[in-house]
Image: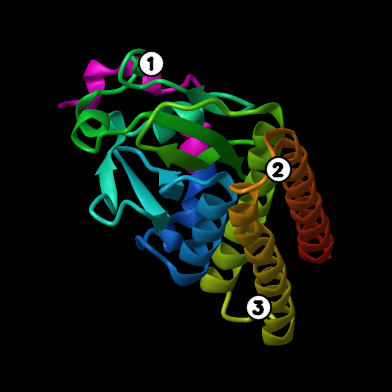
Amino acid sequence: MALNLYPDLIPSYEHERMAALQPYQVLGTPGQGVFNEFVSVVATLFDVPIALVSLVRADDVVFIGNTGLPEAAVVPREDSMCSVAILHDGPTVFDNIPSQPCTLVSPYIAQQQHLGFYAGQALRAPDGQPLGSLCVIDRKPRQLSPAEGQLLTQLGLVAQDMLTLQAVAASDAAFDPALRARLDGLVQQSLTRLHTLAELRTHDVDSDATDAARYTAARLDEASYLAQSLHRELLRVLEK
């Protein structure tokens, strides 16, 4: 399947986007440790089997964070809905892929992997150009609630910060090791807190429906707050 069969995947600003992506090419190895840990927490928070951090390159999409889809480390750009997510500001959602598939990409991978739901948030360089996405995927159709949409956006900001940190550290031999250790520690501490919060999801199952809904809303609000706090702290340190 050739990319030129799906021209709508290529935005008018593709040249600028590729220039913005260049510093992040050092992260082109699939399945990196810290990103794998991050998407594992994200998958648990959203109660889905698959979560990915992607970079959308000229001809393909590489999943530098991957939980639940190990057989898809790198896929053609026209086969990935992450190629569509980078075209939008807010979350890109396909809540029933079997009955309402994404028409901008080839349906082959979604059919082969039995995908039912996709929600992706574009990840951007400091100049605003889209680099890739943070996405959550389910094998059955489902809805993305407003609270989940807000959380996905906040976690996308954290993923952006992590991309910047990893790219700078990988390309700059003079990057302050003490600062790197501080930032890594901050990320690990926050991921641990988010993981603990995500694991509390199991307590919803035996609750009264109304109580469970309130509990879920409170848990998502707390996760969103933690993500916002981590983003602010990483941004404050990275901008120094």
Comparing 50 with 71, the one in front is 50
How packed mark 3 is, by other alpha carbons closer than 10 Å (few <14, some 14-19, many 20 or more), is: few
Considering the numbered disc 3 on the image, is that residue within a helix, a strand or a loop?
loop
Q: Which mark is residue 175?
A: 3
For the C terminus, give its image quadrant: bottom right
Name the residue at 59% across, 36% down.
129
Look at discs 2 and 1 and give the one toward the viewer. 2
Q: Is residue 194 above or below residue 177?
A: above
Name the residue at 76% across, 40% down.
211
Q: Which mark is residue 39?
A: none
Q: Is residue 14 magenta?
A: yes
Q: Which residue is mark 2?
A: 216
- Whether residue 186 sits left or right of residue 203 in the image: it is right
Look at discs 2 and 3 and give the one toward the viewer. 2
| Residue 60, x across and y down, in percent | 30, 41
Q: Which residue is mark 1?
A: 8
For the N terminus, give its image quadrant: top left
Comparing 206 with 203, the one in front is 206
**In contact (CB < 8 Å): disc 2 and disc 3:** no
Look at discs 3 and 1 and give the one toward the viewer. 1
User: What amino acid type should be assigned to the residue bearing mark 2?
Assistant: Thr
Please give the range of residues in magenta.
1-19
User: What amino acid type should be assigned to the residue bearing mark 1?
Assistant: Asp
Marks 3 and 1 sit apart, C-alpha to C-alpha, by 39 Å
Mark 2 or mark 3, which has the lower sequence index? 3
Name the residue at 62% across, 53% down.
201
User: What amino acid type should be assigned to the residue bearing mark 3?
Assistant: Phe
How packed mark 2 is, by other alpha carbons closer than 10 Å (few <14, some 14-19, many 20 or more), is: some
